Image (cartoon, rainbow, N blue to C red):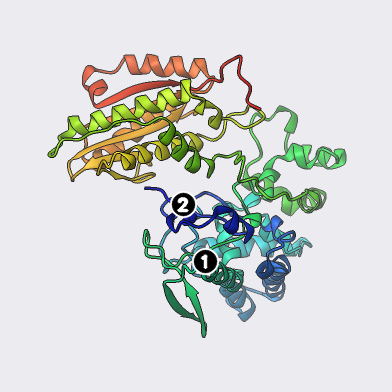
Amino acid sequence: MPISLTDKFNIDKKAFLDTGAFDPILDVDARVFIDPALLDGCTVTEFIGARAKAEKYFSGIITLLSHAQNTRDMYWRKADKMLTFTELTGTCFGYSQHGTSGNAIGKVLRATILHTIKELICVGEKDPTLFELLGVFQEGIGCDRVSDLLTFILATEVREFTQRIITTFDLDNCKVRINGVVYSMYRNEYNGKLLLLLPSEILSPLLVADGFNDIDRICFENERVRREINEYFDLSNRKTKLSKVEILQLMKSNPSFRAALITAYKSTPSVPYDFKSDPVGEYVWYDVAKEYVSKYPLLLELPTNPKIADVYSVVEAICTQYKTLVEDNGLWNLLYNDDKKPKHERAAQLLFFGIADSYCTSNDVDISREPNAGKGQVDFKLSRGARDKVVVEVKLTSNSQLQHGFSTQVPIYMKQEKTNKAVFLVIDNGHPKSLKNFIDCYNEQTSEVKEKIVFKLIDGVPPKSASLA
């Protein structure tokens, strides 16, 4: 079952919070990352000066590339070496944990980044902030890659901080020697990796840099830059945002745009993410699931030798209870931000996972539960043994891939898992046309398909009389 570090060891949550450390869920990765823009304001002892250290590292790469004449000389090779690193796993963050032997930025992508930075150097740009903005203009780079790179650069700080927290609460269960230094650490029993802790105030699922692919925002106070960009792209008539390729082209060809982008990024206030209200829904589901399962118990039973129908009955009971909790007991509000905008679909998926897992645990139902597993990325699987499996996919009506999930995603996963039973759980968050189109599509399916993939609908639209405040 999902369990946080503090719950695993019955640690006082306030005492842990006072250390500044993020309380990770040991068996579920949270999609939060180190935001370089937050490093400056970090007050945790080990990370004071971390932003300057990262910028010095990036400046070193830029200096080497400035002297490089070709990709074979020693300057280029040294720059390449500085971008060659082994991913530090164990943080319980990111999109996945890939093991400790892989390089977080592969050879081809590394070469692409170096060529991009070299091109920008050649047009006069040497600001180390370029590396923080890679996710804005470099194909193949996202906030997870930048975060991995920062974790590598700040590896000593991460280990020293982790050791302090681990030893403060007597959690150390092993000692490891790294680069000649012995650390007291905790090996996570759920993945076998050394747990790495990070300060909450440098973590966010909403990185400052991510907002800078919105050209209108960058040009809001700079009409001259807007006019210059319009020489390349007719922004007023575009229906989509500029792609990374287009933004990179502007970075290389338009000094005014490049300066505006960097200035806007540096001048935007960096505010630590509010994990208590959790606008994205990456963490709040954990405590809510435990609270609601305790408040609204559900009896689940399996016979000694269950068949697929028995496993499905458990899944159906959980889905029905989830529907009740959303529609009648207020959990719909976890699907929206304070500004009434829907959260990402993952918030609903994590909430379902927490609810389902907690009900199975509270009833001592021995069923394997695997979130985000498989090629089709289906959200939940319940199984007893190797054959009796039921998969569940949670989708919002705001998802443009709603029908694709039903017709392609779930069947792929069912085939992979060798099961003939699935539940397609659709939560309506205010998109009637999308819902109608899907229902029409579902009604056209054969009875055989409907028997294999059962459609269940949840009304997640906020009650008109209720307040989301």
**Residue 71 visible within the image:** no
**Residue 295 visible within the image:** yes
| 435 displayed left or right of 430 | left
Circle nearer the N terminus (2, 1): 2
Q: Is residue 86 depicted above or below 286 in this figure?
A: below
| 221 displayed left or right of 210 | right
| 329 displayed left or right of 238 | left
Q: Identify the amino acid type marked 1.
A: Phe
Task: Identify the secondary structure beneath mark 2.
Answer: loop
Q: Residue at x 55, y 64 (%)?
A: 110
x and y percentages locating residue 349 in the rendered image: 44, 36
Q: Which residue is mark 2?
A: 29
Instruction: Tell me which corner region of the image, top left, top right, bottom left or bottom right, holds residue 47.
Output: bottom right
Q: Residues within 10 Å of mark 2 (few under 14, many from 20)?
A: some
Q: Is residue 386 depicted above or below 326 in this figure?
A: below
Q: Nearer the viewer, residue 334 or 133?
A: 334
* Residue 88: numbered disc: none
Q: Which residue is mark 1?
A: 169
x and y percentages locating residue 84 in the rendered image: 53, 70
Q: Identify the amino acid type marked 2.
A: Asp
